[in-house]
Image (tube, rainbow, N blue to C red):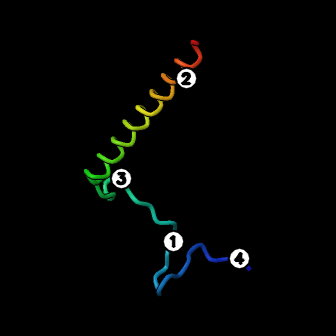
Amino acid sequence: MTEPPYEIYDGVAVLEEARVLESQRPPLSPVLVQTAAAMGVSMVAGATAVALVHRRRTRR
């Protein structure tokens, strides 16, 4: 016996998986954007500091 091409959830037949359209997604929070930017800046600063220390130690 094959399964039907739909599933029943709370009495509602679902024919295919739910898809979220780009227009339905909520906009990014400004705080989230600022946090991500700050993390990126701190990662670059940290990598630069490590590279400079490594460069100084290998020149000797």
Q: What residue lies at 40% left-to-right and 32% top-to-bottom?
A: 45
Q: What residue lies at 27% left-to-right and 52% top-to-bottom?
A: 31
Instruction: Indicate which disc, 1 or 2, sits on the residue closer to the N terminus.
Output: 1
Q: Is residue 10 above or below residue 36?
A: below
From the image, tell me which residue sits under label 1: 15
Tell whether label 3 touches label 4 (CB within 8 Å): no
Q: Secondary structure at mark 2?
A: helix
The crowd level at tag 4 (other Cα within 10 Å; few <14, some 14-19, many 20+) is: few
Q: Which is more toward the observer, 47 or 53?
A: 53
Instruction: Indicate which disc, 2 or 4, sits on the residue closer to the N terminus.
Output: 4
Q: Is residue 33 left or right of residue 20?
A: left
**Distance from Cα at disc 4 to Cα at disc 1:** 15 Å
* Viewer-side label of 2, 4: 2
Amino acid at the residue labelled 1: Leu
Instruction: Indicate which disc, 2 or 3, sits on the residue closer to the N terminus.
Output: 3
Amino acid at the residue labelled 2: His
From the image, tell me which residue sits under label 4: 2
**Distance from Cα at disc 1 to Cα at disc 3:** 21 Å
**Distance from Cα at disc 2 to Cα at disc 4:** 64 Å
Q: Residue furthest bottom?
A: 11
Q: What residue lies at 71% left-to-right and 76% top-to-bottom?
A: 2
* Viewer-side label of 1, 2: 2
Q: Which is more toward the observer, 32 or 57?
A: 57
From the image, tell me which residue sits under label 2: 54
Q: Which is more toward the observer, 2 or 32?
A: 32
**Distance from Cα at disc 2 to Cα at disc 3:** 44 Å
Amino acid at the residue labelled 4: Thr
